[in-house]
Image (cartoon, rainbow, N blue to C red):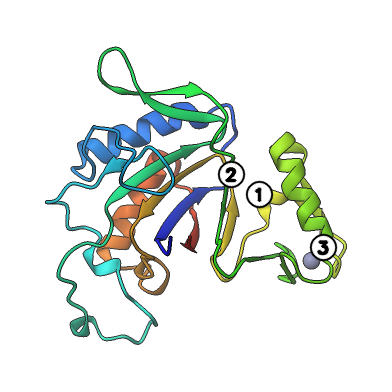
Amino acid sequence: MGDRNTSLVNTEISRAVAPKAALELYERLLDSGVILPELRDDLSLGGFAFPLRDDFRGLDDLEDWRSPEQAMDSHSPGHTCITAIEIGVTGYRWHIGLTGRPELTVQPGNNGLYMNFDGGFSVNCPFCRSAVKLGADGSEGLYEALNAWHQNPESSLLRCSSCNATVPLSTWQSENQEFAAGHLAITLWGGNLLGLLFRPSSASAKRLRGLFAGSSGIEPALVFCLV
Ligand SMILES: [Zn+2]
């Protein structure tokens, strides 16, 4: 335990088109020299993931940023902390197909919820930004919404006790980057790539977001976890 990861989550994609988009995302990461084509189950706590290529250095300057003011030249990582990238699709799992290539099959496992474990998480109302922290007073509705998401994500609604808005759980995100719900995501295992948050205009941040979004142009929710 004590592993860190970083997730980029598409909170807008429908469950129906997520598997096809995931295969396209896999091809983009492969063709761009980010990952190796093989599935490994010993590189992440999350299960099957694709190893990061040793010669891909495009994540190096996204590591270890603590604030926007941190000077560029104060940062010089010796190596990339990320070891593997997991591509998450709600209700699907990766496996090696008969042709030797990774394929997706329907299987429970990935539930489309990305959340911090150690220290918990809070979510914010998309309208008034009020926070609800899991486990705190007034978080019963959040527990119910999480349970409802497991049964049927589309019917999972959460009401804000401050402004009374009742909206899908996936539209609630976390201002502390601790939670997101969505049907397609990548999780980079081995570190919190805070540069995505603090240096969003850097070449590396733009490239990673671009690889994730593809032609859809969506802005992913960021989730930084300590597992
Ligand atoms: Zn609200």
Residue 152: percent from left, percent from top: 73, 34
What residue is disc 3 on?
160
Specify the amino acid type for callout 2: Glu
Residue 1, can we see it?
A: yes
Specify the amino acid type for callout 1: Ser
Which quadrant is home to the N terminus?
A: bottom left
Q: Quadrant of ligand 1?
A: bottom right
Element under disc 2 = loop
Q: Nearer the viewer, mark 1 or mark 2?
A: 1
Element under disc 3 = loop
Specify the amino acid type for callout 3: Cys
Q: Is residue 113 left or right of residue 38?
A: right
Residue at mark 3: C-beta within 8 A of ligand 1? yes
What residue is disc 1 on?
170
Q: Residues within 10 Å of mark 1 (few under 14, many from 20)?
A: many
Q: CA distance from mark 3 to mark 1?
A: 14 Å
Q: Residues within 10 Å of mark 2 (few under 14, many from 20)?
A: some
Please determine whether, in this image, residue 221 is positioned above or below residue 95.
Answer: below
The label on residue 12 is 2
Q: Is residue 145 left or right of residue 93?
A: right
Q: CA distance from mark 3 to mark 2?
A: 20 Å
